[in-house]
Image (cartoon, helix red, strand yellow):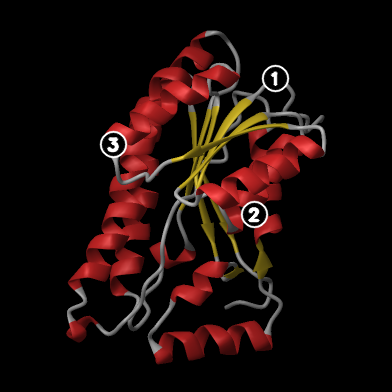
Amino acid sequence: MSESLSGRVAVVTGAASGIGAATARLLAGRGARVALLARREERLEALAAEITGAGGTALAVPVDVTDAAALAVAADRVAALGTVDLLVAGAGTMLTAPFELGRTEQWQRMIDTNLTGLVHTIHVFEPQLARAARSGGPADVFTVSSIAAQISAPNFALYCATKAAVSHLSRNLRTEFGPRGIRVTALEPGVVETELMDHLDDPSAQAWLDGLRRSIEVLTDADIAGIVAHAAALPRHVNLSQIVVLPTAQV
């Protein structure tokens, strides 16, 4: 089976770094026209230049996914590439601390970005995805959840809760989107080496993750990008609805 994505129009949120950036690079390398969405404009412009320099097509669209009105404007800009038929909702944040500390600002930030921002993102691009599906082509939504959706971990309570919500939202959206020809895939990676690790300020959580990174070979953002590209290239009647991907040695 060919894994070319030529002719596809993709939107990747969280494209300034990590899984989002790696996925954007690979989708463009496989022939998709890619819109890069994130808050950090300089990084988006640099990535867009890298992709176009390699012969691909990319459009940098700075936006904060927690701002529904700004997302609507972004969707209009993305239309310059064509009708979006592939959405990778990768924007997210991971902040950890003992619950008893009551870091309500961190809690709200994770809820706003990981869940509310995801909902706004899918909603604003759904009309284009539906139009692509009606035309007889593939249409995909990938949500970047986490193995945290399935596990319990001290000091990760709010993060785990937001990712559980992402996975359950994805399952439920399939009941509405699937009959209309839009595939929904929830990605649930284990430990991935990305800059999210650098955002932790809880010593015990940092020590746990650092221990894992020293003791096993963890996933890379390119590993996840490859899975997205493969799933998107499957025949349109085939939907990998939930993909759990772990480092082989992570238990």
Q: Helix or strand or loop: what does disc 1 sit on?
A: loop
Q: Residues within 10 Å of mark 1 (few under 14, many from 20)?
A: few
- Sequence-wise, which precedes: disc 2 or disc 3? 3
Residue 108 x, y percent position in the rendering: 23, 62
Choose between 243 and 50: the one closer to the eye. 50
Q: Is residue 120 visible?
A: yes
- Marks 2 and 3, how far apart at CA: 27 Å
Q: Height in image: 81 above or below 30?
A: above
- Sequence-wise, which precedes: disc 3 or disc 1? 1
Residue assigned mark 2:
224
Numbered disc in front, either 2 or 3: 3
Residue assigned mark 1:
7
Asked whether the beta carbons under mark 3 and mark 1 sit within 8 Å of each other, the answer is no
- Sequence-wise, which precedes: disc 1 or disc 2? 1
Residue assigned mark 3:
68
Q: Height in image: 211 above or below 229?
A: below
- Marks 1 and 2, how far apart at CA: 22 Å
Query: What is the three-letter code of the residue carrying label 2?
Result: Ile
Choose between 171 and 30: the one closer to the eye. 30
